[in-house]
Amino acid sequence: MSAIVLRNVRPLGGANVDVLIDNGVIAAIGADLPVDEVHIVDGKGAVLLPGFVDLHTHLREPGREDAETVETGTAAAARGGFTAVFAMANSTPVADSAAVVEQVWRLGRDIG
């Protein structure tokens, strides 16, 4: 993964800054960060927030893939700014055993 700089973004409650992300990790935050050979995205003053966590997600898999799958549900969550989701136990069979919970966990792990 390469480096990226988010220019001119505003952490909630703060002043506009640049954020350097290197290999998926925030490496530096500051004004007018010096950068060489990185992808630059102009945030145009947008508010910068951490990834959100959805504690009540209906993924429906296993058993109700017609309504939602782990893949489609997590993709939709990511598009909305969520970096983590917690699946409700409303699958068929109900995710109330270690085996079913592990199956759902594996599905999520496999899609990344």
Image (cartoon, rainbow, N blue to C red):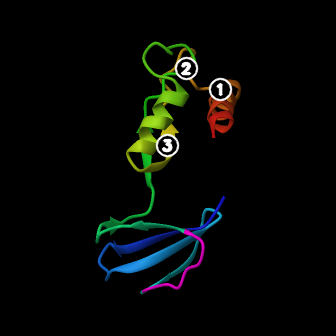
Q: Residue at x 42, y 36 (%)?
A: 76
Q: Residue at x 46, y 44 (%)?
A: 78
Q: Say whether residue 69 is left or right of residue 112.
A: left
Q: Residues within 10 Å of mark 2 (few under 14, many from 20)?
A: some
Residue 34 magenta-drawn? yes
The residue under label 1 is 97
Query: What amino acid does circle 1 point to?
Result: Ser
Residue 37, horizontal then vertical, whole percent: 60, 72
Q: Say whether residue 4 is left or right of residue 46.
A: right
> Along the line of sight, which residue is nearer the eye, 5 or 62?
5
Q: Residue at x 43, y 29 (%)?
A: 58
Vertical placement of 56 versus 103: above or below? Answer: below
Q: Residue at x 31, y 67 (%)?
A: 47
Main secondary structure found in the magenta portion: loop
Question: Mark 3 and mark 2: span between their CA atoms?
Answer: 18 Å
Q: Residues within 10 Å of mark 1 (few under 14, many from 20)?
A: few
Q: Which residues are magenta?
A: 32-38
The residue under label 3 is 85
Query: What amino acid does circle 2 point to?
Result: Val
The residue under label 2 is 94
Contact, CB < 8 Å: mark 3 with mark 2?
no
Question: Mark 2 and mark 1: span between their CA atoms?
Answer: 8 Å
Judging from the image, what secondary structure is the residue with disc 3 in?
strand
Name the N-terminal-most of marks 3 and 2.
3
Residue 85, horizontal then vertical, whole percent: 49, 43
Name the N-terminal-most of marks 1 and 3.
3
